[in-house]
Amino acid sequence: MTPTARFNRPICVQGGYLINEVKNLDDVLECLESWPQERRGLAYETLYKACREAAAGRFPVSAVAENFRRFVKKADMLAETHQIRAISN
């Protein structure tokens, strides 16, 4: 596998009360590997394969980023950056 390319901008994924920044292919794969088995379908499989192809240099990383953004948006887990408040100590 080639070194992981970073996305132009992070994709913020909300899971419960936590928001994770997905910044590269490794982050996408980590998210997909933890995706609940019962929620995996054709979109999941297609995105997973695209991610593996991008890691091998055979698919554009920018396309994976956009498709992942759409995937989490459809799952109602996309957190837009204007919705995020910084937590101060």
Image: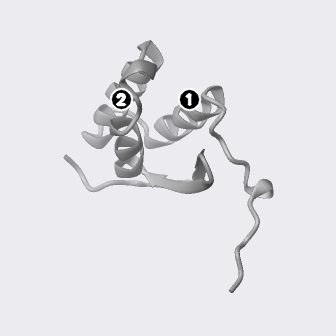
- The residue at 66%/32% (across/down) is 76
- The residue at 74%/60% (across/down) is 84
| Closest to the observer, 33 or 26 | 33
The residue to which callout 1 is attached is 71
Q: Quadrant of the C terminus?
A: bottom right
Apparent side of residue 86 relative to residue 46 in the rendered image (left or right): right
Residue 9 higher or lower than 36, as above or below:
below
Furthest residue toward bottom: 89
State the separation of the CA atoms marked 1 and 2.
Answer: 11 Å
Camera sees residue 46: no
Furthest residue toward right: 82
Badge 2 marks a residue whose secondary structure is helix
Furthest residue toward top: 42
Q: Residues within 10 Å of mark 1 (few under 14, many from 20)?
A: some
Q: Quadrant of residue 28?
A: top left
Apparent side of residue 58 relative to residue 84 in the rendered image (left or right): left
| Percent position of residue 18, x then y | 58, 55
Q: Earlier in the sequence, mark 1 or mark 2?
A: 2
| Percent position of residue 8, x then y | 56, 55
Q: Amino acid at mark 2?
A: Tyr
Q: Residues within 10 Å of mark 2 (few under 14, many from 20)?
A: some
Residue 22 higher or lower than 52, as above or below:
below
Residue 40 higher or lower than 88, as above or below:
above
Q: Quadrant of residue 78?
A: top right
| Percent position of residue 53, x then y | 30, 32
Q: Amino acid at mark 1?
A: Phe
- The residue at 43%/37% (across/down) is 60
The circle on residue 48 is 2
Badge 1 marks a residue whose secondary structure is helix
- The residue at 35%/46% (across/down) is 30
